[in-house]
Image (cartoon, coloured by chain):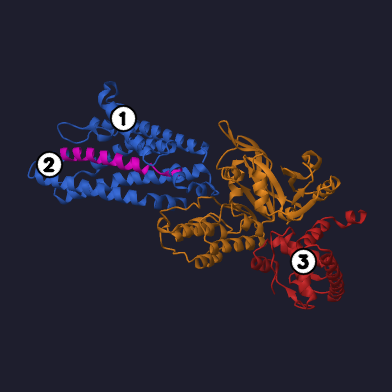
Chain colours: A orange, B blue, C red
Amino acid sequence: MTDTFVIETRGLTKSYGNAEAVRELNLSVGAGHITAFLGRNGAGKSTTIKMLLGIIRPTAGEAVLLGTRIADLKGSRETRRRVAYVSEDKPLYRYMTAEQMIRFASSFYPDWRAADAKKLVKEYDLPLDRKVKSLSKGMRTKLALLLAFARRPDLLILDEPSEGLDPVGIEHLLRTLVARSAEGVSVFFSSHQIAEVERIADHVCILDKGCLLVDASLDQLRQFYRRIDLVFSSAPVEDKLRVPGVERIQTTGNQMTIFASWNAEEVIERANVLNATSVQVAPVGLRDIFLEMVKEE
Amino acid sequence: MLWYKAWLETRSRFLASLCAMTVLMVFFVHHGEYVLSPEPRRDTYLLLFYVHHYLMGMWMLCVVLLGMGGLIRERAVGASSFTLALPVSRERLVGVQIAVGIFQAIGLAALPWSAILLTTGLNGRPFAVWQAAFYFLLLISGGLTYFAMAVLISSLIEGEYTAPAVAYGLVILSGIVFANVGWLRPFADLWRYMGGDNHFNKSTYLLSGPFPWLGALASLSVAALLLVASVGIIQRREF
Amino acid sequence: MFFTLTPTTGQPLYLQLMQQIRHAAETGTLQDGDQLPGVRTLAEELVVSPNTVVKAYCELEHEGLLELRQGSGAFVIGKRRTRSLADHVQAARKLIRDLIQQLREVGLLDEEIRRAFEAELLYPPEIAKKR
């Protein structure tokens, strides 16, 4: 739990022709934490991750992964030895058996734990001598995750890890992520399962249309992000309540809903000064924060 | 373990090609000799000349197939993000795949020719080993250019069927060009080179003359250039 | 020993855990000298980030309820201090019970009472004093 960063990007940009998949991204992912990466489909999450791993080259900007600049090709190669990555498509070689995949993966990474691999094979009930192409989707997902979980990398990057897993599998996934984090592995994962993210993540980054909208600790969001529902006796003026911290104001007639990421107290003070007839405050769950932040204005 | 992976990936294709080619060549030779007997030995040499051309054709078909695959194909099936995330340079990834392909291409020429030698020997019409070696070396030194071309095509074109189609198309196109463009013969006609046509002695029906080391070098240099280009393309490519 | 952390109640998880550990100590579920589960064990059991557990344990050590011994884990101490806290809570609950009774008699509904409490609780102690 130090102050170092496992991932740092500065102005990271990726354009495809005129479209910008990632736009001037300044991301900082701290070491020793579980950080979640949220965003709609096509928001740029996978593109960002692929740039970090050298699978795609950025159009502009730079990034540092575990202390090595991604532009340093030779250094990045060594860095990849300390990173475990499972992409969305749960990549495996169809012509190999599960056992061959495990032997193949283990030969490249000195942080491989054979005992853990064995344990996971048993827990997942993986048939070792069946070719990957004849495994069910769930089995393939588990095998792909096993290849990362049987290691102790400095950084674990997962792109939509729970996709393809049943609820029991998801629970096992979360427990494993928590266990790895406790062992010092920094976890960076993207997910659409917001409920799961809320349970285990320390920190969340929300990406939309290539831009970082939210970069906050979940405890901070829980403590300070508030939804304030106000009723006035006459149509209220939005600008009077737009204090620092206010993210969004929706007005319908005499009713106003305000989402504030902090400083809700000042909003309430102003509301009282403006003689609001009703003031209701409630915490906002991560799903609603996400939906509000990515909503079109 | 990259070598093991490349082997597992191409194992079925390779072994199937190897079996098919060996069986067919043995069949041609054996049946041909049966039909020929008790004709003079010279006719066996002519038979083998033709058999070599069949072998050449099949070999080129199989070797183009061996040049397919690689990272582009992996991307289409969704496995490339694992390979590219390995702590291995792209040159090494592609290099090992190419090397395994080359060994397999050599094997695909060596084994059938060995079987042909065995068959003629068992039929009482032994063929000189150095003649077989001559044919074999011509095939390999000329044919690896086609292998390299296939590798280059598969690093440029993504479609599972488009890539081999284009590669085969180029093979056929080259054949047409060599057949119809007169000034290319006899020094730049690759098919004549590979088939041994340039060295075929019309009276002895054997390959004669010194082995064309310069020609082999030229052809292999072209192959090497195409392979280096393929590696370069993969290095710069986005996945 | 059961802890339940709810991610959606607007309270940081480590605070929830702290409260529940304190409660366990107050009610005697946790006795003086008892050892709390290790960070990894508890995190896995609750399926929550280990940082949450670490934060909770550290804050409770700061408050004097726990002692973190290098290599062995977190142990409950200072129960005497917690007992006086429990007395405070007892007294507070009596006050709250009476207040709620009064508000109900005036005609406020339970929902309104709850919202009023929540709105007031939003003010950190320093600002509340000024009002």
Q: CA distance from mark 1 to mark 3?
A: 78 Å
The answer to whether any part of residue A112 appears in the image is no
Front in this rendered view, residue A50 or B229: A50
Chain letter of the residue carrying label 1: B
Q: Residue at x 80, y 67 (%)?
A: C60
Residue C18 is marked as: 3
Q: Residue at x 30, y 40 (%)?
A: B61
Give the residue at mark 2: B41
Q: How many numbered badges does the structure rendering display?
A: 3
Chain letter of the residue carrying label 2: B
Query: Residue A254, image x and y in percent?
Result: 75, 44
Q: Is residue C110 above or below residue B179?
A: below
Residue B174 is marked as: 1
Is C21 placed left or right of B89 in the picture?
right
Work out whether mark 2 precedes mark 1 in sequence or the reverse, and give the earlier one: 2
Chain letter of the residue carrying label 3: C
A16 in the magenta segment: no
The quadrant in which residue A179 appears is bottom right
Q: Residue furthest left?
A: B38
Q: What is the three-letter code of the residue carrying label 1?
A: Ser
The answer to whether any part of residue A272 appears in the image is yes
Query: Residue A219, image x and y in percent?
Result: 73, 56
What secondary structure is marked by label 3? helix
User: Disc 1 vs disc 3: Cβ atoms closer than 8 Å?
Assistant: no
Of circles 1 and 3, the one toward us is 3
Of circles 2 and 3, the one toward us is 3
- Write the start and end of the magenta stretch as one range: B46-71
Is C70 placed left or right of A49 in the picture?
right
What secondary structure is marked by label 1? helix
Is A22 placed left or right of B117 in the picture?
right
Q: Residue at x 72, y 43 (%)?
A: A253
